[in-house]
Structures are given as C-alpha cells and as structure tokens.
C-alpha cells in the first residue's frame, strides 16, 4: 500500500512542477487541436500527479467520487508531509482540489467555470465549507482548498485558493449571471496570474 503521507520537499516540488505542467499543457493543446475537444479535468490532474511522482515529488492523491464531489466541492485530495522552512518542523498537509480548465470563449477570452452549482449549492461554497470542517475535525493537519486551473498556455496554469475565488465573486456588481461572472473572474485571475502559480502550491500551505 502506498504511503498516505509521503514527504515532499517544497523546493523540489517547485522545480519538478514546472516541467510537469509544461508537459500537461502540451498534452492539453495536442488533445484540443487533434480531437477538437477539451480533455477531462481529472485526467489532467492524473497526468500532473504522475509526472510529479516520476520526478520524486510524489503526492498521495485520492480521486473523489461523483457523489462526494457533489456534496463537498472537490474532485481530488492531495496529501503529503512537508518540512516547514521556518523551523524545520514536519507537518501533514491535506489539499482539497477542484480542477478546472481555461477555455477560450467565442471572443477568444479564457474562461473557467467558477460558478458551477448543483442542488447542494455553489461549488465554491461547498469547497470552503468542506475545508473549514476538516480543520475542525483534524486540527493537527494543515488543510486548505482551491482550484487547479489548466490551460494550453502553461503561463495560465494556476492554483487559486477557494477563499480568493469567493472574495472576488462576492464583490462582482449587480448579481451577474454565470456567463458574465465566469468571464469576469477568469479575466481577473488571468491578469493576476503571477499571484497564483501552481509551483507555489505547497507554499500556500505555510
């Protein structure tokens, strides 16, 4: 059985993730150009995890069932152990991940579906509630949640904490519908891409 809490070096992850994301973006681009379709988001996460593992930055990844995703708002859970750079203490980290893809709309603007909702509510709120409850249930584990955004252009592969998505959505004017809201949120995060690189994913756990 795989170790559910493998140790991952923060700096090692940063280096390997850059290569891994470049390969994932190349696959996404090839898939879209060749087949005319967008690859499955979880399949892109599968590839990302595999390429990290090949580079000795292995996360323990658990795919969420469709039913659990509908209730809790995440489609993957990453787990690992890190050594905090500030004091050298070893800490368990659990990441509740929802994968999305940036796709160009009819005007060529990159858009991801941040406003997805089902009978249980808006996905972003379900995800935030899930991680809040996880922190209560397991206070010794550092838990956080967010969106892994994949793109054919590697510079727009992002990790956006769920709290940032909710904060940005909350201040949108005039209660826009999902099309307008998704475009506005996506443009905001594209413009702020330097704040949200996936290679800083573990840094967000600090």
Image (cartoon, rainbow, N blue to C red):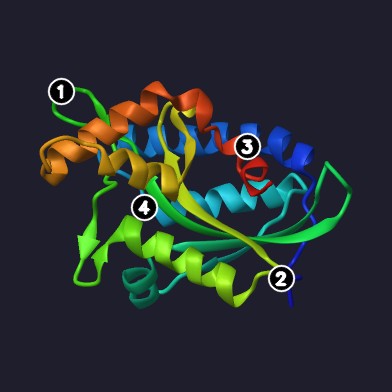
Q: Look at the image and tell me whether residue 70 can be seen.
A: yes
Q: Are marks 4 and 1 in contact (CB under 8 Å)?
A: no
Disc nearest the viewer among 2 and 3: 3
- Rendering coords of residue 69 (x, y %): 37, 69
Q: Is residue 51 above or below residue 64?
A: above
Label number found at residue 189? none
Q: Residues within 10 Å of mark 2 (few under 14, many from 20)?
A: some
Residue at the image position 49 percent from the left and 62 percent from the top: 76
In which quadrant of the rendered view does residue 35 lie?
top left
Q: Is residue 180 above or below residue 132?
A: above
- Disc 4 target residue: 40
Disc 2 to disc 3, how far (Cα)?
22 Å
Residue at the image position 64 percent from the left and 46 percent from the top: 51
Q: Residues within 10 Å of mark 4 (few under 14, many from 20)?
A: few
Q: Earlier in the sequence, mark 2 or mark 4?
A: 2
Disc nearest the viewer among 2 and 4: 2
Disc 2 to disc 4, how far (Cα)?
25 Å
Along the horizontal axis of the image, is 145 left or right of 71?
Answer: right
Residue at the image position 74 percent from the left and 44 percent from the top: 55
In front of the other: 204 or 3: 204
Q: Look at the image and tell me whether residue 74 can be seen.
A: no
């Amino acid at each position: 059985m795989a170790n559910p809490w493998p140790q991952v070096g923060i700096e090692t992850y940063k280096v390997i993730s850059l290569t891994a994301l470049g390969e994932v973006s190349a696959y996404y681009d090839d898939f879209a150009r060749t087949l005319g379709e967008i690859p499955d988001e979880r399949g892109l996460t599968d590839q990302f995890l595999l390429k990290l593992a090949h580079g000795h930055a292995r996360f323990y990844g658990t795919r969420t069932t469709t039913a659990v995703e509908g209730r809790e708002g995440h489609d993957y859970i990453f787990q690992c152990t890190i050594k905090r750079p500030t004091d050298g203490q070893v800490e368990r980290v659990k990441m509740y991940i929802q994968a999305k893809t940036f796709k160009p709309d009819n005007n060529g603007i990159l858009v991801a579906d941040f406003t997805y909702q089902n009978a249980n509510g808006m996905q972003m709120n379900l995800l935030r509630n899930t991680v809040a409850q996880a922190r209560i249930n397991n206070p010794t584990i550092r838990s956080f949640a967010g969106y892994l955004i994949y793109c054919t252009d590697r510079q727009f592969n992002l990790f956006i904490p769920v709290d940032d998505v909710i904060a940005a959505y909350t201040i949108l004017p005039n209660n826009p519908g999902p099309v307008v809201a998704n475009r506005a949120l996506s443009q905001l995060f594209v413009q702020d891409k330097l704040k949200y690189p996936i290679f800083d994913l573990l840094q967000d756990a600090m």
